[in-house]
Structure formats: C-alpha cells, structure tokens
C-alpha cells in the first residue's frame, strides 16, 4: 500500500463512527447491521472495536477494527462484493477454495457467491469497500454485450504493489478527495461515473471467470469498430444510420454502441458527426474563391446551418465564414 494512499484516508478516519465499543456483543450486532449476519469468535486480546463509513452513491467505504483477534464466518455475502485490506495487522482470508494472506500489500476481493472465513490478527484494522452485486453483474453484462449465465467470481488475491493495484488506490483516493476539499456532497452523476470506473477496473484488470470471454469480446469489438470506421469513411456523404453501420460491421446496434464507447468515448453517430465536421473544416480551409459556407455544410450532411456554425465555432474557435475568408 502506498504511503500517500494511507494518508488520503483521513476523511474516513474523521467520519463519525457507526459504533465504537469494548463490548463484544455490541460489536457483533453493529457489524452485522452494516455488513451481514455472521458467526464471530473472540480470541486473544482486548476488545476495542469501531466502524466508520462513508457512503458514496451505491459504494460504501468502511474502516473496521475489532481490537482482539477474531474468527469470522459469514458464509456467502450474497448481495455485495467486498474488497478488504489491512491497514494495521494481518488477516488470513479463505474465499472458496483459495486462502489469501492479507496485509498492507495484499488485499482480498471477496465475491458475493463464494463462502468465506476470516481470521484477523490482534490489532488488525481494515479498509473495506462494498459494491452491490447487481452493479458488478450489470457492468460485466454491458461489457460483454450479453446476459450472464452465472455469477461473476473473482480471483481473491489482490496485490497492491502492482500497476493494477496502484491504479486501484488512485481511484479510491479520487473518491475520498472530494471529502477532503468540501463538506458538500459530490454530484450524483460524478459519483456514479467514478463507481463505474472502479467496477470496470476490476472486470478488466482482475482475473475472474469471465476474463477470457471479455478478452475475446474486446478483440471482436476492435474489429467491429474498425469495420464500422471504414464503412463510415466510405459513405460519409451518404445518409447514415446506426442500423446500416452496425450491419456493415457485423455487430448488433447495442454491441457497436458499447464498442465505440469503449474505443472512442462516443457513440457511432457522434463519430460520424466528428468525421463530417473534420471534412467540412478541410474543405473550408482549402476552398476556391466563390465557395459558400452553405454549400460545404450541405455537402457533409449538415442541413441546419445555424447548428453547424455553432458546433464549428465550439470545435475550431472561429466561425466557418472566418475560416473561409482566412
């Protein structure tokens, strides 16, 4: 775990505790309410527990400490995926058939449908990130362009001293930065986008039972995007719609839209508009005397002259007429 990441957890440490107690039964009941019903066996050490939480849209960040060494057996989490990493101490975490020796460099990613058992050392304090299962599965389905036939199950070992792990820390820090800079809640759309980035990071970087299918899908989507691009460029002055473009690429409309979003960050029709605007700009800069802005706009499919001029100025910092006269 990077030092800057730990120092960035200040907003979470400053959050009012959901509970703070030296009573074993109170600690068990409080963690059950925040997470899941579980068997809890207290072992060596003094009970000195607390739980702090920041709710960020549908994702929760928590700090949990028991103080004493504990054995925890919650079975399957069912409704949510849980990432956890010790900030102090260590833990042995059994997830399905795997065992993770968790410390500040190795976290655990606990899939909702795998049984778990946890043994926390005395003085262990952990950062937990809780993501609803339906968000994980919806995002995976969108990336695949198909419905899932079984739950998503991740490899539980999550190394933080890798590029993948450091990037993950940066993304969590981005969420926490908002709470360092202002007391206001972050915009809901921003939070949703950050959550989706976290989820897609896991799906694209952490090994799971759909990883190979996603890789194949990614290769196919690149091919479909390339075929769509070639078709668009060849028919840029013709009437174009999503159906024709998708058919030419060998993809469904939904699949092509997802592929363009992944590779270009925009829809196929937005890509068409961008290409047409570029061609109009070239024509205006190279136009012979007597050329009219209207003729260039219509040549490239812009039938609403006012809207064309507005978008052109936003893109190039001057009007089409100013370009034509330059």
Image (cartoon, helix red, strand yellow):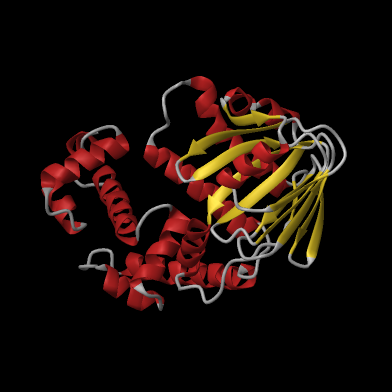
Residue most extreme to the right: 44
Look at 32% across and 50% down and name the residue there: 278
The answer to whether 87 is drawn above or below residue 218 in the figure is above
Residue 24 at least partly seen: yes
Quarter holding the C terminus?
A: top left
- Residue 307 vs residue 27, the one in the foreground: 27
Q: Position of residue 46 (x, y in %)?
A: 82, 32
In this rendering, would 252 be left or right of 286?
Answer: right
Quadrant of the snapshot with the N terminus:
top right
User: Which corner quadrant of the image does residue 4 belong to?
Assistant: top right
Q: Residue at x 61, y 47 (%)?
A: 32
Residue nearest the viewer, comparing 294 with 12? 12
Can the viewer see residue 292?
no
Q: Nearer the viewer, residue 242 or 120?
A: 120
The one of 101 and 239 positioned closer to us in this rendering: 101
Q: Position of residue 198 (x, y in %)?
A: 56, 48
Left or right: 15 in relation to 315: right
Q: Position of residue 207 (x, y in %)?
A: 68, 62
């Amino acid at each position: 775990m990077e030092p800057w990441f730990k120092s960035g957890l200040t907003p979470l440490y400053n959050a009012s505790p959901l509970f703070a107690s030296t009573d074993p039964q109170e600690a068990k009941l409080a963690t059950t309410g925040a997470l899941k019903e579980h068997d809890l066996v207290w072992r060596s050490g003094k009970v000195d527990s607390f739980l702090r939480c920041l709710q960020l849209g549908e994702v929760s960040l928590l700090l949990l400490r028991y103080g004493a060494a504990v054995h925890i057996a919650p079975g399957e989490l069912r409704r949510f995926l849980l990432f956890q990493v010790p900030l102090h101490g260590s833990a042995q975490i059994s997830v399905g058939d795997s065992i993770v020796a968790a410390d500040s460099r190795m976290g655990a990613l606990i899939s909702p449908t795998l049984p778990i058992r946890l043994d926390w050392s005395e003085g262990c304090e952990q950062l937990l990130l809780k993501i609803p299962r339906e968000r994980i599965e919806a995002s995976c389905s969108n990336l695949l362009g198909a419905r899932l036939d079984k739950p998503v199950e991740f490899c539980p070992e999550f190394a933080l001293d890798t590029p993948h792990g450091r990037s993950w820390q940066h993304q969590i820090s981005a969420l926490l930065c908002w709470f360092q800079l202002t007391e206001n809640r972050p915009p809901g759309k921003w939070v949703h986008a950050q959550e989706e980035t976290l989820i897609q990071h896991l799906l694209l970087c952490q090994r799971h039972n759909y990883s190979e299918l996603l890789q194949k899908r990614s290769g196919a989507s690149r091919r479909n995007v390339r075929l769509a691009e070639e078709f668009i460029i060849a028919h840029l002055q013709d009437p174009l719609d999503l159906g024709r473009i998708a058919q030419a690429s060998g993809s469904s409309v939904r699949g092509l839209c997802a592929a363009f979003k992944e590779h270009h960050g925009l829809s196929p029709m937005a890509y068409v508009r961008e290409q047409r605007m570029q061609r109009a700009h070239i024509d205006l800069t190279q136009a012979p005397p007597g050329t009219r802005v209207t003729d260039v706009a219509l040549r490239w499919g812009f039938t609403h002259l006012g809207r064309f001029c507005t978008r052109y100025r936003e893109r190039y910092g001057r009007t089409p007429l100013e370009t034509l006269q330059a």
